[in-house]
Image (cartoon, rainbow, N blue to C red):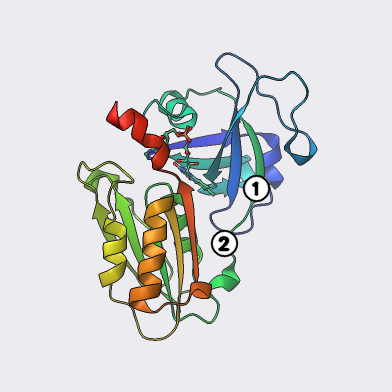
Amino acid sequence: MVRIAFQTPGFADFPVEQPGEIVTLIWPDDGAEVVLPADGWRFPDGVPEQHARNYTVRRHDPATATLEIDFVVHGDHGTASRWAARAQPGDRLGYAGPRFHWHHEHGDGAAWNLLIADETGLPALAAIAETLPAFQRAIALIEVENAAERQPLRCAGRLDVTWVERGGVHAGETLALADAARTVALPDGAGHVWGAGESGVMRAVRDCLREQRGIERSAMHILGYWKYDDTKDWIDA
Ligand SMILES: Cc1cc2nc3c(=O)[nH]c(=O)nc-3n(C[C@H](O)[C@H](O)[C@H](O)COP(=O)(O)OP(=O)(O)OC[C@H]3O[C@@H](n4cnc5c(N)ncnc54)[C@H](O)[C@@H]3O)c2cc1C
């Protein structure tokens, strides 16, 4: 994971209101200038393809007009990952957003919040945990490559964290998060679940929570942040 800070005057009044808000980052082809889309995500005629990826606002500081984003560096086969691994002060990107997908009302009335993520969802999970009210218990299941990838998490109330380490297995090739969801101790009362990570893994997590833990679909907001299927070609190669 690489944390990169972005600065531009527009970030002084960037309307980040909820934890884990999303920005779309835009990269031009190598050596070309960034071109931003106009209304409705339309690029001017003749512009070479721009590469857009979604990322999470890990921290926003209006005073310094700074936005921090945590990038998973997963190799050179992805535009974003390749860029993040080599980013230098002064590099420029385009951005659009922010937009939110976590509402505080999601957890309202819940006795506890279960937060589940791989590294791509960890920035949002950490930001959500930081804003949960002290009276709500929080339980986090987080998949990372190894112990070195663990991060300190802050939460006003009690937060029980289980780190699920892949230990050499490629991301997207293990359902260990679903196994953890199957067995994690949950407090009494009705809870709310938020999750983000590889699409297939998150589907397995959601199915497991619904079928084996009896959690209603309406009490879960579980999102796919990336797709493993596309990865197979270069892994097998
Ligand atoms: C709402 C939202 C918020 C997100 N927030 C973050 C964030 O804060 N930090 C973050 O790192 N990611 C985040 N992601 C995930 C990120 O957008 C994807 O991982 C994206 O595919 C990375 O782009 P890339 O150019 O590096 O790789 P791509 O060009 O998209 O993919 C290239 C190859 O890499 C594989 N791949 C993609 N991501 C991973 C990965 N994490 N591990 C292993 N293989 C991978 C793909 O399967 C593909 O084969 C978020 C996604 C969404 C939808």
Residue 232 in view in this figure: yes
Residue 106 lies, with reference to residue 23, above or below; the image says below
| Quadrant of the image occupied by residue 125 | bottom left
Q: Quadrant of the N terminus?
A: top left
Is 17 displayed left or right of 200 in the figure?
Answer: right
Q: Give the CA distance from mark 2 to mark 1.
A: 12 Å
Give the total number of marks visible in the rendering: 2
Most distant residue in the top direction: 31
The residue type indicated by label 1 comes to: Pro
Residue 8 % position (x, y): 65, 34
Residue 69 % position (x, y): 50, 41
Residue positioned 75% across, 33% down in the render? 42
Residue at disc 1, CB closer than 8 Å to ligand 1: no
Is 142 displayed left or right of 53 in the figure?
Answer: left
Residue positioned 69% across, 36% down in the render? 9
Residue 169 lies, with reference to residue 157, above or below; the image says above
Q: Which residue is mark 2?
A: 102
Residue 174 lies, with reference to residue 32, above or below; the image says below
The residue type indicated by label 2 comes to: Trp
Residue 103 lies, with reference to residue 45, above or below; the image says below
Q: Which residue is mark 1?
A: 98
Residue positioned 71% across, 20% down in the render? 47
Residue positioned 25% across, 44% down in the render? 148
| Quadrant of the image occupied by residue 72 | top left
